[in-house]
Amino acid sequence: MQNPYIPYPVEVIKIITEVETKDQKTFRLAFLNKQDEENFKYMPGQFAELSIYGKGESPIGIASSPTQPGYIEFTVQKAGVVTSALHAMEEGTKMGVRGPLGNFYPIEYLEGKNIVIVGGGFAFTTLRSLINYMIFGENRKRFGKITVVYGARNPGLLLYKDELEAWGKRDDINLNLTVDKGDATWKGREGFIPAVCEQVAPSSENAVVIICGPPVMIRFTLPVFFNLGFSKENIITSLEMRMKCGIGKCGRCNVGSKYVCKDGPVFTLAELDQLTKEY
Amino acid sequence: MEKRSIKKDALAGIIKKVAGDMLVYAPVKEEDGVFFRALGAGMEPQTTYANTKNAPKNIFFPHTEKMMKYTRTDKGMEFVENGDPAKDAVLFGSRPCDAKSFTLLDLLFDQEKYKDPFYCDKREKTIVVTQACVHPPYSTCFCTSVDGSPTSEAGSDVMLTDMGDSYLVEFFTPKGEKLLKYFGDAKPDAAAEAKKKEIAETAAAEIVSHIPAKEIKPILDVNFEHPFWNTIHQRCLACGTCTFLCPTCHCFDISDEVKYDDGIRVRNWDSCMFPMFTQETSGHNPRPSQKERWRQRTMHKFKYYIDMFGAISCVGCGRCVMYCPVNIDIRKIVTDISKL
């Protein structure tokens, strides 16, 4: 019997400090057993429990794309016991990963459609996974226009800077970066995400928008997309709740009759409307 | 179905004989009540008790349970082994309400995807021998309101029914029949079947608490924001007694315990009544007060579990009613909801 509580052993093979404040790092993990990597088949939008023996577990969205074999990546904000322990780790350390958990962005539904991705601050991780998935090789043909709006409080807080630069050079992604407030080196856009979405004004025709960010950003961004004509079925987001087991047993991450860990974390706005507002 | 008849005074001896061959959990008298305990030498199993103070769920889902063991190496902590495998066991003397709770917990822990190995291992290896309630013991019993009965077979492998001067022993499952050899050869007489039926009817009729538990789901469906939820939680102390004594409450926490170079990961019962239960690292708490926690507990039992598995997650044992230190009564809550 496969025990869903036992993590796969992994080694931290690379640590990238993403932001100036140094409290958001990307951890690249490689499976110690080849078979485990095959068992860990995931899709963009899923998460996993990062497992540190002696400290505990923390549910984190998978930031790498399934198109990147050989490793998985997680971008982690230093916050509590487990994430602080992670941040204190060095390359070469062994730890555990339990997953993949939860549902994922509805790739089949997204195929043939124009995709709008809106990310605010640190919540960009699984969106990055989705973008890398969609633009990888032959995958790109399966999707229509890709428009990305991504912002942070200041330029130093933008994640994945090398990739952003590479995406900016491609002509098959419409990349719109913004910061709340720029600095001396920032030559790009300044402004809040909802305002930038209004300016970019992606068409709602045959289009789906996926929004992840802090609640306040989401609250002001949704009306922009309603005005652009997006239906609630075509607005997708991802929820967070405190979790332990990640497999719908321990009983704490439910919103109404749905467990965010098992039935989510990805929901359409139409689905969220059916749930209670207890998140 | 195999049936046997045993003399009443033979039961304790049979339980002890089984306990000589395998692990037996039975009701044992302690200072402040009767509890399910693993039967050891010199411990006397109770055969005439109302019900145990603790629900027997801890036999399959212990209060605290080792999930795995790990140790420190020069490259960090590494996995060593799983939790301990379960032993063949017999649970003697659960009441029908508690036996039914196992079928409800099965729905959660024994799913096709993400089968819970710790629960299922113990559940598969344990024979449940239930004692029918010929006279329902408490005024707080309300099993008949939640699809149960004082003689319900749900969740039982074997059932004992007190027929006056003897016990009728019914073996419902092949698992239960493994115990046949301990119960002798005496078959019940021809009148036993009719008498059992009569007992079932009179026992059900003796239940005095009746609540509209099966009628409130449609009301709960549309009343998440109803002001009623402001009226039940004020005196709650958030002690968690209701959830810890509840046969169907299954929430747990996972934590790590380390001593020197060795550590274990354990799961411990947790409670939706506790403020920290849903508290996030950021400080945000989706259920910020006892009001939301009571709504969660009520909804979980009488709405969410039906949405998820098609069954009410309450067996009507009445423990939460009896032991709540501030007399919050789920029977009253359910009845009040039915009038919204």
Image (tube, grey):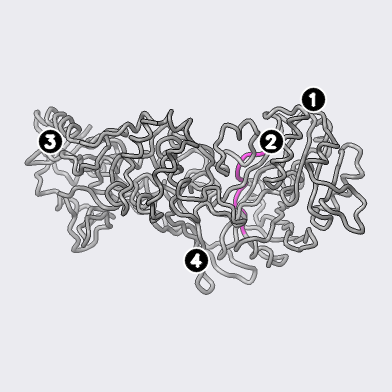
Amino acid carrying mark 3 in the image: Lys
- Name the residue carrying label 4: B257
Distance, label 1 to label 3, CA atoms, is 76 Å
Q: Are marks 4 and 2 in contact (CB under 8 Å)?
A: no
Residue underneath mark 1: A205
Q: Which residues are magenta?
A: A96-106
- Quadrant in the picture for the C terminus of chain B: top left
Query: Which chain letter matches label 3?
Result: B
Left or right, residue B109 beside residue A221:
left
**Secondary structure found at label 4:** strand
Cα separation between marks 3 and 4: 53 Å
Q: Quadrant of residue A91?
A: bottom right
Residue A272, position as x, y percentages in the image: 61, 35
Tell me how far mark 2 sits from mark 1, CA to CA. 16 Å
Under mark 1, the amino acid is Glu
Q: Which residue is mark 3?
A: B187
Query: Please, which residue is most extreme toward the left here?
Result: B165
- Dots 2 and 1 on the same chain: yes
Mark 2 and mark 1 lie on one chain; the one further toward the N terminus is 1
Disc on res. A236: 2
Secondary structure under the numbered disc 3 in the rendered image: loop
